[in-house]
Image: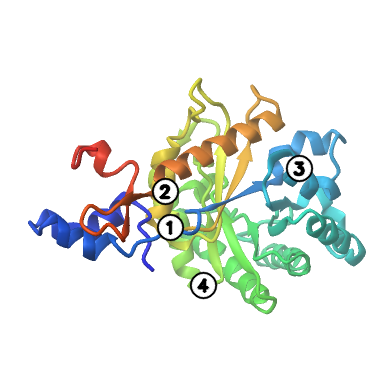
Amino acid sequence: MTRITSRRDFLKQTSAFTAGLAFSSWAGSALATTAVNQPLFDISLAQWSLHRALRGGKLDNLDFAKVTKEEFGIEAVEYVNQFFKDKASDEKYLAEMNKRAADVGVKNVLIMIDGEGALGDPDAKKRTLAIENHHKWVTAAKTLGCHSIRVNARSNGSFEEQQKLAADGLRRLTEFAMQYGINVLVENHGGLSSNGAWLAGVMKMVNLPECGTLPDFGNFVLDRKTGEEYDRYKGVKELMPYAKAVSAKTHDFNKDGNEINTDYMKMMQIVLDAGYHGYVGIEYEGKKLDEYAGIKASKKLLLKVREELTPEETADPCCSQENYYVPRRGLFRRGLFRR
């Protein structure tokens, strides 16, 4: 059955009404068979959210899945290779990670890869080495049951040169990863990769469905020296057509529990408008709240946004035996109908 997931989709489906069709006809044809039986998106936890605890020895990588489930009630995790850097080929260790996650009912979603070289390095030999350095993480992701690895698209040169170099490295790595059923995802992570148009152009050049993006709501600083930033909403919108994961970056919250840097209602509407309903990974990087409190505040915000954007069941005025759904932020709040 069809599910209405956004105001945009809703308005498309109800255009007949605005053209003058009777409400009863509209309700019966557009909404009477609509049902909501799954959440608009699921929530995962990026391991970087606990990087201070991990680096400080207060949390072990092997306990990450358990803490994720028992402390935060989250059932999917996104690992960071920094916290088990020497274990990529250690089958016994990876098996233990799998066991720990399975014991608490947690799904391994992806591994974020850093420090393995620039996939867009202008030096052909260094670029090849970087590609090969990522191979072990592809096989580790396969062993852990992840769907993807997240990589960076760092390069040097002009706008166009960096696109070509990054596309070459990503294509070659993706062709290797395809053999294991693993996707290669690129995050906007500084420099030109934080330019949504640039990274979308790289995706077009690679032109492989297994190579996608991981839009991060907060990583749009183009120049750390000047503080120049790319418009985060524009950037996420440009990257969402290629997205296979999403990073919900949070720093600080106001008294109402909203993130002060990102309008989460607006941002998640962009995500849903792109047809994405997968995992949205919490990545808390704030300092005012401790890591545990920051993760909980992030989850609370995402749940609030999900509830607001989820269509709600309302009795059909025309057919008492039928149900139809209207977005909570849609008709009533815009005054198109009154309760």
Residues at marks 2 and 1, CA–CA distance in whole angstroms: 8 Å
Dot 3 or dot 1: first in sequence order is 1
Dot 2 or dot 3: first in sequence order is 3
Left or right of residue 265, residue 279 in this image: right
Residue type at tag 4: Pro
Quadrant of the rendered image containing residue 20: bottom left
Task: Give the labeled residue for mark 1.
Answer: 36
Mark 4 is surrounded, within 10 Å at the Cα level, by few (under 14), some (14 to 19) or many (20 or more) other residues, namely few
Badge number at residue 310: 2
Dot 4 or dot 2: first in sequence order is 4
Task: Give the labeled residue for mark 4.
Answer: 209
Mark 3 is surrounded, within 10 Å at the Cα level, by few (under 14), some (14 to 19) or many (20 or more) other residues, namely few
Residues at marks 2 and 3, CA–CA distance in whole angstroms: 26 Å
Q: Are marks 2 and 1 in contact (CB under 8 Å)?
A: yes
Please, what secondary structure does the residue beneath circle 3 have?
Answer: helix
The quadrant of the rendering that contains the N terminus is bottom left
- Outermost front residue: 320
Mark 2 is surrounded, within 10 Å at the Cα level, by few (under 14), some (14 to 19) or many (20 or more) other residues, namely many
